[in-house]
Image: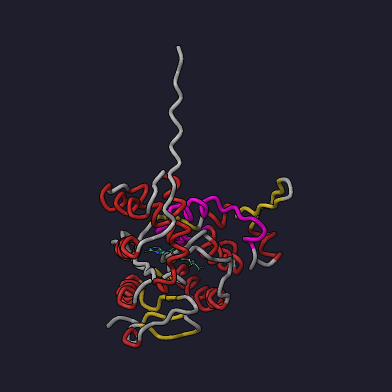
Amino acid sequence: MMIESAPAPKKAMIDNEISAQAYARIVELSRKHTGIVLTASKAPMVKSRLTRRLRALGMSSFDSYMNFLEEENDPVEMSKFISALTTNVTNFFRESHHFDHIANGVYDHICAKLARGQRVRIWSAGCSNGQEPYSIAMTLLGRDMTLAEKDIRILATDIDPQVLAFAQTGAYTDTQTVGISRDLLRVFFDRETTGDREIFTIKPQVRNMVTFRQLNLHNDWPMAGTFDLIMCRNVMIYFDDQTQARLLRKFAAKLADGGWLMIGHSERLPDDTLSIFTNVGVTTYQRKAQA
Ligand SMILES: C[S@@+](CC[C@H](N)C(=O)[O-])C[C@H]1O[C@@H](n2cnc3c(N)ncnc32)[C@H](O)[C@@H]1O
């Protein structure tokens, strides 16, 4: 019996221009689903990233792609649209002053809580490829290896399933390990050489402290209880002022009294949140006790 192979998808000629109308639809869909504000200056970046989606789907124009996204309600393509629009730049121990703060004040607070038999919960919101939550875990273990067996969990969330899948492997190339001292690399990573590439894989005691979950910060947050530390760095910068203010109020509600909030270097807390937070370091805030 002859089995006919499926015809190869026709390669569509892509109309390489985004019309003002199609761009406005992309901007609106991005704002609605992710909160990410796309200005006119982002158009070349958006065009280049979404052209790959058009090609994969055999579509010839951005208008047809937007019709598909708006009408088909296809969660897989929506997720790919979101992945294409997110910026995932990150590094181990990025903005190192936060990790100095964790190694000192936060660590002392954690030890006191554990000594009282209480649990410790940390949230890396917008964790990208995992370097941020793993850096938190390594900082704490760097102070005391036995913390790996204590009731400390680091929740690491992101909207983008592609970065989460990568983060869960815990495997990084040597260029991705920039920022980690040789000592930490030796203690916390297994090193493997394949061909001319070196891969550094996070050791289980670090990895086991971190749980990765997909979470869109604009949807409901299903986590019960409060956190002792929330890092949300270089994420809110992509949102408008109103969205940032709403998120900050939600973070405040999710922080235990005295819990820390760490934000990115170009992010600011609006003045009206200073009744909730005390500034205790560079882009580092502590939640005031609630009356
Ligand atoms: C520039 S990275 C920052 C990574 C890390 N926090 C750091 O500072 O190195 C921004 C991350 O925020 C995520 N993000 C963007 N919009 C989001 C949303 N609405 N909900 C959750 N994560 C989002 C992106 O997918 C991306 O991984």
Compare residues 121 and 178 and report the one nearer the observer.
178
The residue sitting at 30% across, 81% down in the picture is 290
Query: Residue 101's spot in the image, x, y percent?
Result: 53, 78
Horizontal side of 58 relative to 201 (left or right) equals: left
Query: Residue 244's spot in the image, x, y percent?
Result: 34, 75
User: Image quadrant for the N terminus?
Assistant: top left
The residue sitting at 44% across, 68% down in the picture is 42
User: Image quadrant for the C terminus?
Assistant: bottom left
The residue sitting at 45% across, 75% down in the picture is 263
The residue sitting at 54% across, 59% down in the picture is 148
User: Which range is magenta?
Assistant: 149-177
Task: Name the residue at the right extreme.
Answer: 196
Query: Residue 146's spot in the image, x, y percent?
Result: 57, 61
Compare residues 48 and 138 and report the one nearer the observer.
48
Can you see residue 91?
A: yes
Compare residues 111 and 26 and report the one nearer the observer.
26
Can you see residue 229?
A: no
Query: Residue 212's spot in the image, x, y percent?
Result: 45, 55
The quarter of the image that holds ligand 1 is bottom left
Residue 166 lies in the magenta stretch: yes
